[in-house]
Image (cartoon, grey):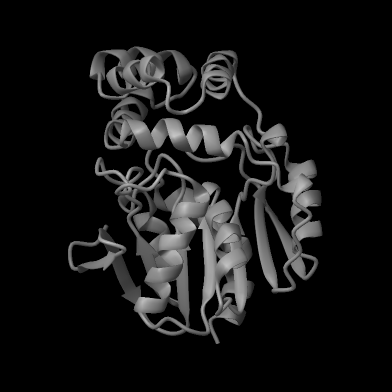
Amino acid sequence: MPMTLPKNEIVISQIRFSYYRLGQGRTLFLIPAFHSDVNRFSSLLDILARYFTVYIPELPGISTISPLGHYQHTAKNYALLLNKMIAKLGIEDYILSGFCLGAVIAVRLLQITEKPPSHLMFFEAIYDADYILLNTIDSLAIQTIKTFGPHNRLINSIIDSSLHSDKFLTLYFRLLYRHERHIDQVIPHQIKLTSQMNSRAWVELIYDIFSLHLKKENLIFNIPATLIYNIHDDILDTPKTIAGMKKTFPHSHVFNVNLTQHAPSGPIDKAFVTRLISPLLPILKSLSH
């Protein structure tokens, strides 16, 4: 994140949110992903700020260890609070954007807002939990949370101990990313992103994400949308996800980018952002006016 970027604060429903504002031009409100923070998107923000006035909030429980107040950590509750943030900041005629879980939050925001955005731009939006591909270890952990629910004391105690144990996280990420070329960069990056999350938020969001079935909700939004997906996503069943999102957003255009990971395991650097954004420059320039 550029050192000159000012950090702003706003209180929404007695919860203190931090957010960043940079760039100039048409407003783009960007909702970050699960297991992420603002710093992870700094290289992308540098490019987007050439075309837009970008607002990006820190999500309590995800970007920070502080939880979402008394609210459960669900996409609907984040959407409720971010919708109030947008209104309080006086944002109008804006592009609503989101990464992965951030796009799910954006969908929930569309269901409640009285002032919808003029355009949507989603990166690797999740459509349905059935279309998320998992490794054996993660699948077992998630199934346990789904079986016992997000408020089981024993599960929450285990998760809390695990998320904030550098020793455990080092072993887990060394196993998970054992084929990565730059594993010694990946592990500390993943530990930082994980340990800064609130454990209650992690459990509740995992339960929420893997209970998502938009295909059963039959939502339709007649807002122009730009849907961006990796050709070889290692987590999403991309063809089924895209098909579902196109039903939800009939006025959408899909852009496939030639990447092999849902998200980089290490820091999102300029090389990754260039591969992601280069095919999208014409649409970014068009939307910026």
Q: How many marks?
A: 0
Q: Residue at x 72, y 33 (%)?
A: 130
| Position of 206 relative to 175 (above/below) | below
Q: Is residue 79 left or right of residue 223?
A: left
Image-quadrant location for residue 282: bottom right
Residue at (28, 31) in percent of width and height: 195
In this orientation, which residue lies closer to the viewer: 249 or 234? Answer: 249
**From this viewpoint, which residue is outermost toward the bottom?**
289
In the displayed structure, would residue 115 be above or below residue 70?
below
Depth check: give the residue in front, 187 or 207.
207
Q: Position of residue 215 (x, y in %)?
A: 77, 46
Q: Quarter holding the N terminus?
A: bottom left
- Tell me where residue 245 appears, x and y as whole percent: 74, 54
User: What residue is rendered at 45% in x and 77% in y?
Assistant: 52
Could you tell me residue 91's position as x and y percent? 42, 81
The answer to whether 146 is drawn above or below residue 217 in the figure is above
- Residue 227 vs residue 148, the one in the foreground: 148
Q: Is residue 238 above or below residue 282?
A: above
The C terminus lies in quadrant:
bottom right
Which one is nearer the viewer's eye here, 166 or 222?
222
Report which quarter residue 25 is drawn in: bottom left
Task: Please name the residue shown 41% across and 39% down the image.
Answer: 35
- Horizontal and vertical percent position of residue 205: 47, 38
